Image (spheres, rainbow, N blue to C red):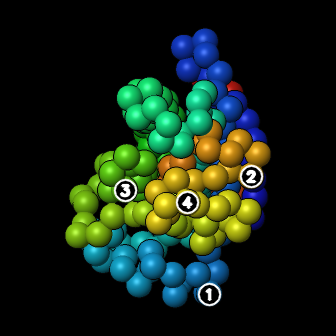
């Protein structure tokens, strides 16, 4: 497991960001993603080689204490993720690499046809990143350092970490 800590810069603002690269092994192919792959991503031909978990640090705790304030923060963090993921998607498309970006709000792919099932990102994180925990039936993620100040998302890559990482490094430097 490779962890990349960095900051994402958008419009002169920096956002704490962590990326976790989880290479998939034969054992992982018994996981929910692969057992239900056709229901999750009906038109994807290649199985992913790595899961990329993207964590953006929230400015407030996302613990249900102020639902209006938290929804505004989640919308703000979703916008940050969408800007990052769109740039990443465009870079990979230019190299004919078919990554799949999962919307953190819906659990469905952003730029691919959606299937019958959705990705439960907090559940996948706790299954693949053992130092993360969840509350309330996988609805609330707890980050080991940030606590409940975390907005998680997911990207699936059909190529190795060594090939995908330079593109992400480039995005993090450009922004």
Q: Position of residue 21 (x, y in %)?
A: 66, 58
User: Within 10 angstroms of label 1, few (less than 14), some, or many (20 or more) residues?
Assistant: few
Residue at image x 56%, y 20%?
A: 10
Q: CA distance from mark 1 to mark 3?
A: 23 Å
Please give the residue where the numbered disc 4 appears in the rendered image: 135
Residue 27, which numbered label? 1
Q: Nearer the viewer, mark 3 or mark 2?
A: 2
Q: Position of residue 38 (x, y in %)?
A: 30, 77
Q: Nearer the viewer, mark 1 or mark 3?
A: 3
Residue 107, which numbered label? 3
User: Within 10 angstroms of label 3, few (less than 14), some, or many (20 or more) residues?
Assistant: some
Q: Nearer the viewer, mark 4 or mark 3?
A: 4
Residue 144, which numbered label? 2
Q: Quadrant of the C terminus?
A: top right
Which type of secondary structure does the marked residue at label 4 adopt?
Answer: strand
Which type of secondary structure does the marked residue at label 2 adopt?
Answer: loop
Name the side, left or right, on which 5 lies relative to 98. Answer: right
Q: CA distance from mark 2 to mark 1?
A: 25 Å
Residue at image x 54%, y 48%?
A: 152
Name the side, left or right, on which 39 lies relative to 52. Answer: left
Residue 168, which numbered label? none
From the viewer's perspective, is residue 20 above or below residue 117?
above
Depth check: 84 or 73 in front? 73
């Amino acid at each position: 497991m490779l962890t990349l800590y960095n900051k994402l810069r958008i419009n002169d603002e920096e956002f704490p960001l962590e990326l976790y690269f989880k290479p998939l092994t034969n054992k992982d192919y018994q996981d929910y993603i692969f057992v239900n792959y056709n229901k999750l991503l009906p038109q994807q031909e290649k199985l992913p080689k790595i899961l990329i978990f993207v964590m953006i640090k929230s400015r407030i705790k996302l613990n249900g204490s102020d639902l209006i304030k938290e929804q505004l923060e989640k919308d703000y963090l979703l916008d940050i993720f969408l800007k990052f993921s769109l740039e990443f998607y465009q870079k990979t498309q230019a190299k004919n690499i078919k990554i799949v970006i999962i919307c953190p709000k819906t659990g469905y792919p952003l730029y691919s046809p959606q299937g019958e099932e959705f990705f439960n990102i907090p559940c996948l994180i706790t299954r693949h990143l053992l130092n993360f925990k969840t509350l309330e039936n996988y609805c609330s993620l707890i980050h080991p350092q940030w606590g409940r100040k975390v907005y998680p998302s997911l990207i699936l890559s059909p190529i190795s970490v060594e090939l995908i990482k330079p593109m992400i490094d480039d995005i993090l430097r450009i922004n």
